[in-house]
Image (tube, rainbow, N blue to C red):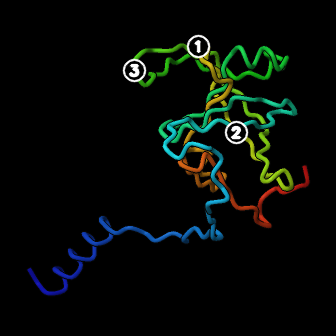
Amino acid sequence: MTSSSWKRHLRTINSVYSIHKRGRRSMPLILLKDADFRTIDPKHDDPMVVTIKVANFVVIKMLIDQGSFIDILYWKTFKKMALSQDVVEPFNEQIVGFAGERVNTRGYIDLDTKFDKDNDFCKIIRIRYLLVDAETSYNILIGRTTLNKLGAIVSTPHLAMKFPLTVEAEVGRS
């Protein structure tokens, strides 16, 4: 093998295995302090449950689930919101729950969701919710996809979730 063919071969191999560097994501500093603790018992194991506004409806008991990839709007909550079923996109696949059980879906819907920060500013993002007909004590489950979209930092010891409010974000007064 000639020197030039060897170099060409190495360039080809390097191009196949190279990782193209994308622009790094930059975020402002987010601090969690002692004043951010939301619980009296420092040894609690409570789940992170918050209240949000979805399509102009206040929804309580929304579970922050850092282990879930999808965002779920439970069918009983969807019905209480009195949204038209015409806006539901068909999706009839089953999902597998934590315990391995299979759960039927009823479609999906894209809804604007408002996250408040300190009751002063908010961030509104569009979330694709999978509609699931299952018995649960929660109304909505928010997973990693939305947490990443928010740029959220979740601290279970603090029972707090913080996210940056930047110029690029849709920001408004509550």
Q: Residue at x 61, y 44 (%)?
A: 40
> Which amino acid is tagged 2?
Ile
Q: Residue furthest left?
A: 1
Dot 1: what SS?
loop
Which residue lies at the image location 44% right of the left edge and 22% below the top edge?
96
- Looking at the picture, tell me which residue is in the foreground, 61 or 22: 61
* Residue 99's disc number: 3
Which mark is first along the chain, 1 or 3? 3
Q: Residue furthest bottom?
A: 3
The mark nearer the N terminus, 1 or 2, is 2
Using the numbered discs, state the Cα–Cα distance from disc 3 to disc 1 in whole angstroms. 14 Å
Label annotation for residue 134: 1
Q: Earlier in the sequence, mark 3 or mark 2?
A: 3
Q: Can you tell which of label 3 and label 2 is closer to the viewer?
A: 3
Residue 55 — which label? none
Is 7 above or below relative to 13?
A: below
Rendered image quadrant of residue 171: bottom right
Q: Would you place residue 23 above or below residue 39 in this image?
A: below
Point 56% across, 35% down: residue: 47
Residue 149, x across and y down, in percent = 64, 51
Quarter that holds the N terminus: bottom left
Measured in 3D between alpha carbons, the distance from the residue under mark 1 to the one under mark 2, in whole angstroms, is 20 Å
Amino acid on which disc 3 is placed? Ala
From the viewer's perspective, is 53 left or right of 43? right
Furthest toward the right, the residue is 173
Label 3 Cα crowd, 10 Å radius (few <14 / some 14-19 / many 20+): few
Residue 101, percent across and down? 42, 15
- Residue 21 percent coordinates (x, y): 46, 71
Tell me how far mark 3 sits from mark 2, CA to CA: 25 Å
